[in-house]
Image (cartoon, rainbow, N blue to C red):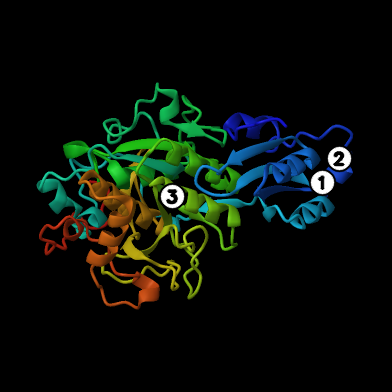
Amino acid sequence: MEDSSWSRRDILKSIGAGVLGIGVGAAVYHRMNEYIIGTESEGGAAAAASVSESGYAEIDLNEHTSTKLVCGVFSGARSESLAARDDVAFVQRDRKLTHVSDSHTGSQSATSAGTLPWGIDRIDADVAHRRGATGDGVDVGVIDTGISATHPDLSGSLADPEVDENHEAWAECSGGDCTYPWSDDGGHGTHVAGTVAAAGGEEGVIGVAPDATLHALKVCSGSGGCRTSAIVAAIRYAADRDWGVVNLSLGSPLPSPALKTAGEYAVEAGLVPVAAAGNRGAADSVGYPAAYEEYLAVSATDIDDELAGFSSRGPEVDLAAPGDSICSTHPDGHTVLSGTSMASPHVTGAVAQLLSQGHTPPETRQQLLDTAEDIGHPDTQQGEGLVDVAAALGYDSGDDGIGDGVSCLA
């Protein structure tokens, strides 16, 4: 049995490229779909691999779970046959998730001399900075559209672009600056990365944990499609390198046992996964993977501490964070975006801050929940409350400022 590792090259040469299996006619092929088969034995994995019509790739999660995933192209009959096996835990479509930005509300040009985004101030990350807490020494994986390698606000935080294992891509970069396979051709990942760890100082913006180390894990195309199998592979990639936290500003309304298993793998490995709750703006609408207990699910608030109208809500929400009209980095400069995509990296930066101070991953998660600020909304909207970096670190958290408001430009 071939032992294929799941990488960008696999996607381009097999499943993602739509290469037909030998002897499979196009009409038949178009009645097939891409699936992820969750197997619990070598025999199950071998069986799945043997009937894929267009090559296959494995994501081995056995180190921390009982599951090995086989990704391939299967007919309905073959997928049903595999699902009937006792050593197959699940069969799911390899769906595309989307990132969860609600809107573009700003310009893509340089900030004035030093902008303190309102969200960074509101969660008292600036208080932590003044006390010397900056997230130093923590590795953060940004599972998204990539990160701009040339943005001046991120250059001090981005892991060395010339070291291959620092960054990885499972989606092809096309358009814009594609110097590296993991370069950001959509802007979303760079914006997320800036909220986590920008260190622009007097010339740009500042993030929650400006001395954390950023790693680009590109799973989304510039247009926002993010394959489930790639997301799972990216989570494993970060966990296997002992990074501290990953941010997933993406989601789907459909359950995904593969993403749940990946979350289990992450938690067992000591990686904290943080995910955006979603932008469906309704009750009981938290998306996946955020809805799984392994992920810290983050809803979005506005500058008045109201739940943002677009934010998903439900009992799965763990924390709230600023997500409406957030100024951050963009490959072309800076811009304002809204969405739970923008809320999640505030919590990711907070996780990095606590890990940097020596808290274990379970302690970090519990400390953030225990010290969150109650802003007066139901638990289904705010979870335990608004994330408070200063309080979580044991500092005075009475600041509650809003920086330069929703401004991003001079």
Crowd band around label 1 with a 10 angstrom C-alpha radius: few (<14), some (14–19), many (20+): few
Could you say whether the residue bearing mark 3 is in a helix, strand or loop?
Answer: helix
Q: How far apart are marks 2 and 3 (CA)?
A: 42 Å
Say whether residue 395 is visible: yes
Residue 146 x/y as whole percent: 45, 37
Q: What residue type is labelled 2?
A: Ala
Q: Which residue, given by chain and number where applicable, does mark 3 sit on? A: 268
Q: Do the residues labelled 1 and 2 touch (CB within 8 Å)?
A: yes
Say whether residue 248 is visible: no
Q: How far apart are marks 1 and 2 (CA)?
A: 6 Å
Could you tell whether 307 is left or right of 295 in the image? left
Could you say whether the residue bearing mark 1 is in a helix, strand or loop?
Answer: loop
Q: Which numbered disc covers residue 30?
A: 1
Q: Splitting the image into 4 quarters, where does residue 300 fall?
A: bottom left
Q: How far apart are marks 1 and 3 (CA)?
A: 39 Å
Q: Which amino acid does label 1 sit on?
A: His
Q: Which amino acid does label 3 sit on?
A: Glu
In the image, what residue occupies the spot 49% across and 41% down?
A: 236
Q: Do the residues labelled 1 and 3 touch (CB within 8 Å)?
A: no
Residue 13 x/y as whole percent: 68, 29
Residue 120 x/y as whole percent: 23, 53
Q: Which residue, given by chain and number where applicable, does mark 2 sit on? A: 26
